[in-house]
Structures are given as structure tokens and as C-alpha cells.
Image: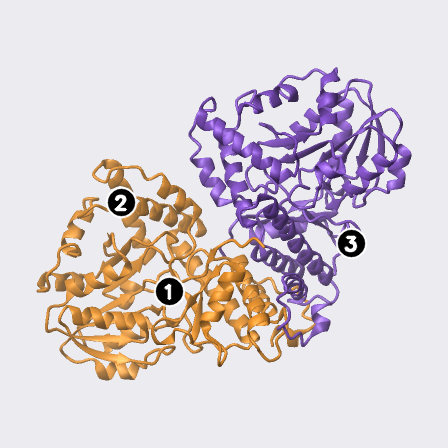
Chain colours: A orange, B purple
Amino acid sequence: MIRKTRLFTPGPTPLLPAAQFAMAAADIHHRTPEFRALYERVLSQLKIFVGTKNDVLLLASSGTGAMEASVSNLTSPGDRVLVLSAGKFGERWESLAKAFGCQVDLVSVPYGETFSLDAIKQAVRPETRAVFVQATESSTGVRHDIQAIAALLKSTGSDALLIVDAITGLGTTHLDVDGWGVDVIIGGSQKAVMIPPGLAYLSLSDRAWKAAETSKNPRYYFDLRKERKNAQKGESSYTPAVALIAALGAALDYIAAQGGGDLAAGRDALIDNAETCAAMTRAAVKALGLPLFAPTAPSAAATAILSPAGVDSGVIVKELKRRFAAIVTNGQGEMKGKIFRIAHIGLFDYMDTIAIIAALEQVAAASLNLPDFAFGKSLAAAQQVYAERTGQATAAKTSEPEMVHA
Amino acid sequence: MIRKTRLFTPGPTPLLPAAQFAMAAADIHHRTPEFRALYERVLSQLKIFVGTKNDVLLLASSGTGAMEASVSNLTSPGDRVLVLSAGKFGERWESLAKAFGCQVDLVSVPYGETFSLDAIKQAVRPETRAVFVQATESSTGVRHDIQAIAALLKSTGSDALLIVDAITGLGTTHLDVDGWGVDVIIGGSQKAVMIPPGLAYLSLSDRAWKAAETSKNPRYYFDLRKERKNAQKGESSYTPAVALIAALGAALDYIAAQGGGDLAAGRDALIDNAETCAAMTRAAVKALGLPLFAPTAPSAAATAILSPAGVDSGVIVKELKRRFAAIVTNGQGEMKGKIFRIAHIGLFDYMDTIAIIAALEQVAAASLNLPDFAFGKSLAAAQQVYAERTGQATAAKTSEPEMVHA
């Protein structure tokens, strides 16, 4: 049969056609009024999307570049920092902090879990300069409670900077950046904003900018002070990724249109969209009889699912690709072979979500040996969730409720 | 929620990305060796796709243009012709034949049905010059038995030309054009070949070319004799639709790739693909409790479904669009408001098909009042059909078979 390749990965995510067209048309030079107008527009749109009054900066790098920039600009060798690690990207914070000479304290929880506030409270020292954390940990499908962590830091009287990798968190979970006191927030292009990889963006609080003035780390490409000075003139320090920036502008226009012209409302609709796709997927997976990997704090960016005992999750990933050209991701790090992940971040809709659930049912039928398997069971569960969440369930007669809720 | 617009219409059909790229890149002049090389390649690919040893001609027109060309080139005013009409496109044959002064005999059956061979036999006269028919009637979802009709004509000793509108038949049903003795076969670009509207193609048997020499109808743009002479030199008579021809080349390459490099095998795989999507849809619709409009001779191009009593089918069409951005078509002609049609012709895969079935289930839940409705029931039926047709059902335990086959 025809198989159309479809990404169900938590980055890169499916591309927005309008952004693809803008990217293809982006034949402009970056030191011109035309580019400056584009750049200024996109930077101001990003402020609304991120939800901050602070400047947002764009970097021609992957998200890791912005993570590095937040370490190299805001810490100095020998600084004491606290890393909250619950997966591969938490570990990346640890590696980055060590690469720039920080003394790292670690609150680490097993993959699939989130942090206890008590453990964080105990790990914060008077001399802690910065706390690094993910909003959502893409490698495990867990959402961390940034609001509670920020409040905890305030309550301890710590003046540590709170630095949040929200690369898969932005557009999938509500973040009141300024209100909660998040000092640095970081995003990436190949995530909720529906364009290819190659851009990172971040914003810094006033406190963070102050820290940037005193950092003793070497930095050049990622010197945020220079970048901000240039950004305020509509310029980038080095050659910007013009086509991606044009694409980002188109994507943010699309997201604004989802909110009736209001970008913040459009972002909230995008979060709600991811939550609905995630809720459908969780209900379906449960009905199928597969355990969720992160049942207590699931993120809406991606759902991580445990493979049945004795089945390498790579088999499920491979079968979904071979039979349906549906690209889902295996576990990362120590979870490789144990879990697989279906994404909801960005340009996924009901039709995408119900189709990947159906394909998973087909793979389960042929390749997994699940007790009480029946075609339609996991789909019925997802259908019910969708109908309830969209308020369309009223007319539905569920004559076989035991099937629907199995 | 995000809603990605998706066509489930029997033309235009979803565009092949590789064809879209070829179309965007088609910045060449049509009186150059570059264009001639493209044109000759596409014309020879089309011969394989159509399955004929005869020349295939391309026209910058809709399919109706090629229908008109077959009337204007092969009949003369006053000729007696037989039109087999079972829907809107059968009626178009009648209108065209009358517009060019033919005396029209008609075998007409109600929408949703196909012809009895006996009725055709009785309608063929010794002086019948041509018989006009559809391979599949897009307005009703019916497949006509071209093989049997061709054999019948031979058996009667008639030397009437058999002229087949296969605009939605090519790529959805097997047609042995030369072997059966089809004299004219007609296709369109926005159908199984996955590109936008704007091109028609057709081929004529030796008998048909002889008739073209004696026709007394006026013709200029659609003069097929001139078009063939030019085509044999790699030229078109008038300015060709260059970008669509480039797209068509890319699409035929894609179809060939589906057959491991063999275009005929790729076309057969495309037919099989449509048949699987159609079989899934029919099983789902039956499980939902909606009657198929053409149960006895369903085409694989599109499935026509009767709306429940008292419900205008336009409501279903509208709700699928409003809630899911899924574009299906209402009935045409006298069936408007009574049926709706879901297409399988061209670039549809399992994921598309299961998703439209799921969306239809949602619309049924909220807007139709079907007895014994349950979420998952129609999906289970489609899942079972897919698994059986792809030979993947062996491992499936169907613990609730009454649900699956409901």
C-alpha cells in the first residue's frame, strides 16, 4: 500500500506548509531594511509566544546552543549550580555546567519520574548561583512543575537564577515566565513552532542580564550581551538563518490565526491541542493494555509508552515505520529498547492522532501478544476522550460502555 | 483544535509532494529540446500507465475536453450513438453527443446501479457508430463492467467504437484496453495521477483513428489528428501546460517506484491500494449502520454512502469540514443531499482512510441518531479488513468478534 511518511517525533515535528513556502521564498540579504523589518517582527512575535516582557533573542543553533549560552553567559568557573535531572536532557544540563567549570549539585530522579520539591529544597545552598531544569523532559515524556519549583526557590530566599529548558515545553504547557520568576527560558525551532531545526530562542530576566555582566566564561558566538545589543537594532551578531526566520514568522502568524489573531490565545490553543492529542493517546494506550511510562506527570509534548515485557520497543518503532511510514521515537539513553514515544507537540491534529493510534493497534495485533486485545478497543477509548474534550459527546450513545472504557 | 485540510474527494485528489516540487521547478520553455525530452518521456510513461500500445495524447483541458474530443473527432452530425448513463457523467456523454448533432440512444439506469448487459444488447443497432460509457461513475461510486460490455459489443458483430471515460477508472480498476477492444480511453490529471486539474489524456485504437479521418465535425483546439502528428515529434499543437506535465512525469516516476521500477506493476499496486481503502471504508460504513449507495458494483475510486433517513447528507459533509477540515463530496445531480462520497483514488493511505472513518464516527456520534452506535465499532471493522487484506491478521486475537464484525 501507499505509505506517506509522517513524523510523530517530538522534534523535528511536522512542517507547517505556510512556513515551508515562506522558507522557499526567503531570497533576501540579511543586512537590508527588508530583513530588519522581518527580524524585528519575528522577535516581537516571539515575546508574545514565550509570554515575557523581556527581549527574546534568536540564535542560529540547535536548542543545545541556547542551553550552552545560558551556562556560558550566566555562570563563572567554580560557581555552585544545581541541576535537576530526570532524563537525557537533564543530563545535558549537567554536562554543560561541568564543561564550563561549574561545581554541580544534582537532584536526580529515575527516568519517567519528576522531582520532589522537598529534595530540591534540601539541595539548594546559600551559594547556589543557578538552578537548571527542563519544563518537559522529552526523553521520558515527563512534565516538571516549573511553577512550584520557582515558588520554592523564592520561599527559600535563594537568589539562584532559574534557567528552564522549555524546548519541548513551550507550546505544550502553560508557563507564566515573568509571573513565576523564570530567569531564562529556552525554545527551539523544530518543536511547537512547526519549522525545521536550526534556530534556538531564549529570553533573560533583568537578574539574568546582571549575571551576564559578571560572568568570567569565555564566549563569542553565543555572547548574549552583544546579541541583545544587535537585536535591539533589528540585526543579528552573525549571519542569521534567514530562511528559518522567514518560516518562523509565517508559523507565528499561523499560531496567531488559531487564536483569532491573538498570538497568546493561539499559543494557548496550541497547548490545548497538544493536551487533547496526548489525552487521546494515553486513553488508547491504556485500553490497549500497555503501561504509560510517566503516568503521574505526563507531558503533552509526547507520550512515552512501555513496551510489553520481552519486546524490544525498537520492534514497535520499526514496524510502525515499515508498515505505515509513521516515525515514532525509541527511548533515549538508558530507556532505549524499553519505551517508545508518540509526539503531540506542534502541527498534529485529531486525524493524525487517531491514525497513529490505529496503526499502533495494527502493530499490536500482528506483533505484540497482548491479553484481551481486540481491534477498535483503543480507538474507542481515544474517540470517547476526543468527544468529551470537544463537548461533542452528548448525542453519542455508548451502547457498549465496557468496550469504550476498557 | 488544529485542523489540517485534507481532500477526500474523487478529484482533485491529494497532491504528491514530489509532483508539487516538479511543478514549482518547471521554469522551461515549451519549444526547446528540454521540453521535448520531458514530453516524450511522459507520453511514453502514460502508454504504460494506461496499458495500451497506442499513442497517448495529452490535452491542456479538463477531462471533459478529452470527452468532447472523442465525440467531435469520432462522430459526424446525424450519427447514431449509444450512451450508457448511470449518473451525472453518463448524462455528460449524452449532452456532448447531442451538442455535436448525434442521434442518441440511451440505456439509462437509476443512480447507484449499473447496466444489464441484456439492455445494452437490445439497444445496439446495426448503424450504431459509437458506444459511450464510464469505467467508474464518480457521481454514484459505481463501477461498470467494461470487459463484459466490450465482449458483448464484439459478440453482436457491431462495429461501434467503444469510448470509455476512465477519468476515475484509471488507477482504480483493471482495464485491459487493447485486449478487450476499448477504442478510446480517457483520463484526467487530478485523479489517480495525484496532480492538480488541467490535463486530460486519451488514446485511440486504429479503428478510432480511421473514424477520425472521416468525421465531419468542426474541431480545431481538440483536433486529435494534428495533436498526434505533433506528439510524435515531441510537440504539442498549442501551448502545453508545462508545469503540470513536469508534475505528471514526477507522479508517474513515483507510481513506477511503487512497482519496484515497473510502472505497470506500480499502477496495479495503486489499484490494489484504492481497493483496500475502499474495502476498509465499506466495512466501516456497514458497521456504523449506514447503507452503501452502490452495494452491488462498488468502485474503488470512491465510496458513496446514503445519509440516514431525514438527514441531509450536506450536514455530514459540512460537519466533517467544520470539525475536521476533511473535505468529502455531497451527491451530484439528483443525489445531492441524499449521499456523500469518500474517495480512495490516488494518494490515500491507511492512515488517511482510518482517520476519515474515525472522523465519520465522531460526526455520527454527535449529529446522527444511529441505533446501536458505539465508538470504535466501525473502526474495528475497518481494522479487521486492513489486517486481513495485508495478511497481518494472524497474530490478532479478536476476543470480541461480535464487535469486529458487527
Which of the pair A45/B129 is nearer the observer? B129
Look at the picture and state if B238 lies above or below B145.
above
Question: Does residue B22 appear left or right of residue A397 in this picture?
Answer: left
The amino acid pointed to by label 3 is: Ala
Q: Which residue is mark 2?
A: A39
Which of the pair B359/B114 is nearer the observer? B114
What is the crowding at mark 2: few (fewer than 14 residues within 10 Å), some, or many (at least 20)? many
The amino acid pointed to by label 2 is: Tyr
- Residue B105 found in image quarter: top right
Q: Which mark is residue A174?
A: 1
What is the crowding at mark 1: few (fewer than 14 residues within 10 Å), some, or many (at least 20)? some
Q: For the point 27% across and 56% down, which residue is it?
A: A201
What is the crowding at mark 3: few (fewer than 14 residues within 10 Å), some, or many (at least 20)? few
The amino acid pointed to by label 1 is: His
The answer to whether residue A304 of the structure is visible from this angle is no
Q: Which residue is mark 3?
A: B309
- Residue B46 found in image quarter: top right
Secondary-structure class at tag 3: loop
Q: Position of residue A199 (x, y in %)?
A: 29, 53
- Residue A223 found in image quarter: bottom left
CA gap between label 3 and label 1 equals 46 Å
Q: For the point 20% across and 39% down, which residue is it?
A: A31
Q: Position of residue B224 (x, y in %)?
A: 65, 22
CA gap between label 2 and label 3 equals 57 Å
Q: Chain of mark 3?
A: B
Mark 2 or mark 1: which comes first in sequence? 2
Q: Do marks 3 and 1 share a chain?
A: no
Image quadrant holding the C terminus of chain B, namely bottom right
Q: Position of residue B21 (x, y in %)?
A: 45, 40
